[in-house]
Image (cartoon, helix red, strand yellow):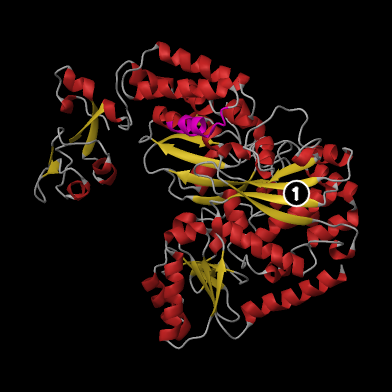
Amino acid sequence: MNNIDGKRERARRKWESLGGGSVPVIYIGTASCGRAAGAMDVLAGVEDALKENSLQAKIVEVGCIGPCYLEPLMDIALPGKPRISYANVTPDKARIIIKAYLLRGDPLPKTALGFIGEHDGEKYDGIPRFFDQPMLKPQVRIVLRNCGLIDPEDIDQYLANDGYIGLQKALAKGSEGVIAEVKEAGLRGRGGAGFPTFKKWEICRNAPGDVKYMICNADEGDPGAFMNRSLIEGDPHAVLEGMLIAAYAIGATHGYVYIRAEYPLAIVRLRKALTQMREYGLLGKNILGTEFSFDITIKEGAGAFVCGEETALIASIEGKRGMPRSRPPFPAIAGLHGKPTIINNVETLGTLPNILRNGATWYHQYGTQGSPGTKTFSLVGKVRRSGLIEVPLGMSLRQIIFDIGGGTSKPFKAVQTGGPSGGCLSSEFLDMPVDYESLTSAGSIMGSGGLIIMDDDTCVVDVARYFLDFTQKESCGKCTPCRVGSRHMVEILETITRGEGKPEDLLKLQVLGETVKRGSLCGLGQTAPNPVLTTLRYFRSEYLEHVTDKFCPAAVCRELIEYRVVKDKCTGCQRCVSVCPTGAITGPRSEIHNLDPTKCIKCRACYEICRFDAIAGDAIIIRSKGRFADEQPTR
């Protein structure tokens, strides 16, 4: 124990010297979201600017701090001064900022996003606090407390910020004491089902056998979800410390991080973290001088969505095809290689060090009685401020979408919670608290935490078809209801989007969906119909427009739409002309354009780029009845 305490003390001095030294520190967000936005080009631009101006600075790569829509993000901390953050940085912008701030001492307040760190007052040189921004102020950062702030590849920075104190307290409490603390905290599994964490642990701990396994499920495969990836990329030691705590509680001697190979950066940072842990005596025999021995292996998955299910994941680790099996026995009794096994989600494990470090009472100040604590979400879709967020459970959808996310540019239509297996909820649910029971009662699920926001430009029938098509293709095919039922549902939805649907198809979808839910073996099939069933329930009128009127009100379903130029709105800006791939739109600048429907491939590019709502989508049936489109404009 004293050995790690000494390392932590040295790490804290090193951390303090980083901010209080004689050399400026430049932090660049190089997680996957930052890299996709051009962070590595910014990094190269920063290095060039320092050389060009003969400046010295330490460059630190950090993870995602949350507001992905502002990436690439760059922070600069001059010695003894707060850290100033800049958003949407380009290589040229980085050069300008470095010259102004490092050479002239001008932080460019009008360009700066906010400051991070200790300072008296709400502003520093006219720059507001970073965490007072509308997207960040309502959040509570527990799991994400280090993300975007520390170097994820430096164990000393994690130690300096109270890293592995949770493990030390766990070892002092004893395994039963750890389980009791987690029980009192009320932590529920963050992988989707929300099962009480301590119950699984108790079952596994009490199961007979000397060999037990601990598995971290990092097989995050939901479209639009990136919470687990971002946590590993930004703070891998938090997840690994949680694995140690969980393994100690159940008596496991070996663990696996099951992570999809599609997360290369997360894997790189995990491997470096494991190497550092071994060097610091945090893995292997007699960890921290105790009788606790534990090691971790990384297992890369091939990206099968069904392997997010516990028994399919276990089969994959064992080298078998990733297919779920019947339960019982549950993995806590007979899991990996037939031995008692616990599988916890990345976020569940990332929460544990905070609970053990601060206590169950502290944790209960956040969330609700039945759903304590916080939850991370990926906020994506038609929302203005997209990114990674962490909020107390029980916060309403309205607060998340409008206060944190900034709402939608066009009228809000729906939010899908829980990824492809979640439900689409209409505006009537905006004031519903986000917790496990409330979402289930509405026909949706918490899932791992994906929130996809939709506006009036979204066709819910097409959304239901898209997500069901995804889960149908990801099905392992083992059980007939999922394999055959989901395929038939997709075929019906495709028929409806082509304008060939019949009113009785809606009843078929309902019956098929409920049959698939009841008859499927695993969670994939049991939740796959949710997008269809909830859209039928809350957006039935839109289905009827597709079936009865042969019309898509969102102008998405190609076979039901014919695009045209709204002449009294067209300014002749030629933006639509520039993106039309077939030359269907013509006309000189500043004059009303024309759209030739015989050349239009309905790619929607003109509709998306027009700033004046001068492109509309009409139901083809209107023209077939001999009516003029201008008599009934739609979108």
Q: Residue furthest bottom?
A: 54
**Viewer-closest of 543 and 508:** 508
Q: Residue at x 42, y 29 (%)?
A: 460
- Say if the magenta span includes residue 180: no
Quadrant containing the C terminus is top left
State which quarter of the image contains the N terminus.
bottom right
Compared to residue 346, the image places residue 132 above or below, namely below
Q: Which residues are magenta?
A: 466-477
Q: Residue at x 62, y 26 (%)?
A: 441
Q: Position of residue 247 (x, y in %)?
A: 80, 50
Position of residue 594 relative to residue 152, above or below, is above
| Image location (x, y in percent) of residue 237 | 69, 60
The image quadrant of residue 2 is: bottom right
At label 1, the amino acid type is Tyr
Please tell me in which quadrant of the rendered image residue 37 appears.
bottom left
Q: Residue at x 17, y 22 (%)?
A: 623
* Residue identified by numbered label 1: 363
Q: Is 589 displayed left or right of 508 in the figure?
A: left
In this rendering, position of residue 628 left or right of residue 136 = left
Query: In the picture shown, does residue 28 fall above or below 568?
Result: below
Residue 475 is inside the magenta segment: yes
